[in-house]
Image (cartoon, rainbow, N blue to C red):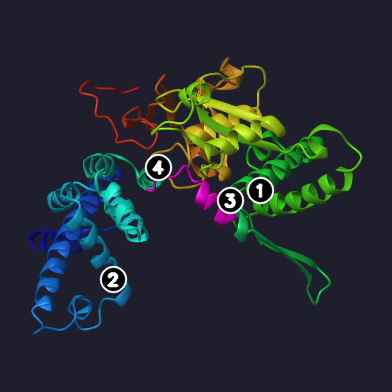
Amino acid sequence: MAVLAEFEAQMAEFDPSLASLETVQDLITHLHHSRRVLLAFEDALTEAAERHEATGKAPPAEDILTGDGAASKRGARDARRRRSAAAQMGGLSASMRRGDARAENVESIARALSRLTDDAHREAFVQADAELTLLAEALAPDEFARRLDGFVRRAMADDGATRFERQRAASRLSLWVDRDGMTRLSGSFDPEWGAILSGTINAEMRSLASAGAKASDDLDNPGGEPGNQQSAFGDRLRAEALVERLRRSDRTSGVGRGLPLIGIVRDHRSVHHGPHPGTVSEFENGTHCPHETTVRLTCDAAVHDIVVDEAGLPLSVGRRYRTATDAQRLALRVIYRTCAWPGCDRTFEHCQIHHVVPWEHGGPTDLDNLVPLCSRHHHLAHEGGWALKIEADRSLWIWRPDGSLHHCGPPGGPPRHPKQDMTL
């Protein structure tokens, strides 16, 4: 209760119009820690509620947890799901009680475990308790979710082939004409068909945009920010790209005649020695692809095949153009699921490719000098006066306009805290 009392006191004294940047950052850090403490407290209360329910003399645990109706039934079910996961995974439970595990990552583990209905699969997943707990403490939620998917597949002793078959069987496309005479499409596709569709349309979009008078930033960001003119431009261009590709598919060669342009990411060891427990095999959007399927696609598709090392970093890149090439964008997509700015959750598709050392100052268009930034943070890096530096391990250094250090750390990982004064 001391945490709540302290937070209430801070809220009473906090004035958003007067708070300095340092105060805001300190309070946000404190807020995240408080959420972890409250998660631990809720887990303890859930355990106690379930114990009372088991006596047969108390209401159901969900009714106890909803209290006087202030909490939802869904929230109570989520709490019980987390409690079930913690009861099976001692390391995770201890981490939660210490306030070390990130709340979002605990929820991801609980959801994943609840979906494993086979006892053998659940037992295999639980055996990874120690490793999962360390990752839940260290990784940002988006990166953790990606790693978690690999643990689930490993527990199921499945390279994803069974799930892939279900997804293929469930693929659908509807087409109809509405009352205004507009033709509408709605569909869902398995990862392979989805990669073929998006890869083909995106390549056509960039070709159409390049032929027009759009600025290079638009070429790097055809999706744009939702709700603005650039997004409308991207949607319109996407429609034109689909029709144009279909219109000329029967009179061109190469990609237009059944050879889709798609991106595949594989690790070096799997390419040369076959699949292993840590195999990386996925499409450029991060969706898992069975190893055998990637082998097939490299034979009958126009593929950007990106091979990564043990650290997950691409092994080779190019240096020729001012704007990032398709292969370089794919390589960056492997490293960054979102904007490279720490804490930003704008997806890679809505980012622009930024030269850390500006092109006009001799900065090359090479992976070592490129990071994806959303529109807001891209403006901070240029007009806003913020400075960036990137290291060989992709650790990003960011300095405020006054020269003080704002952040230092690898993509998706915890920030580093250099001991020395690292003013710019």
Numbered badge on residue 150: 4
Marker count (numbered): 4
Q: Residues within 10 Å of mark 3 (few under 14, many from 20)?
A: some
* Region of the chain picked out in magenta, as a range: 156-167
Mark whose residue sits in front, 2 or 1: 1
Which residue is labeled 2 in the image? 77
Name the element at disc 4: helix
Mark whose residue sits in front, 2 or 3: 2
Q: Residue furthest front?
A: 120
Mark whose residue sits in front, 3 or 4: 4
Foreground residue among 12 and 139: 139
Name the element at disc 1: helix
Q: Quadrant of the rendered structure where residue 324 is? A: top right
- Please report whichever mark, 3 or 1, sits nearer to the chain's N-terminal start: 1
Mark whose residue sits in front, 3 or 1: 1
Residue 327 sits inside the magenta stretch: no
Name the element at disc 3: loop
Image coords of residue 142 (percent x, y)? 40, 46
Q: Distance between the Cα atoms at labels 2 and 4?
A: 26 Å
- Name the residue: 14% across, 72% down: 50
Numbered badge on residue 421: none
Q: Label 1 sits on what residue type?
A: Trp
- Please report whichever mark, 2 or 1, sits nearer to the chain's N-terminal start: 2
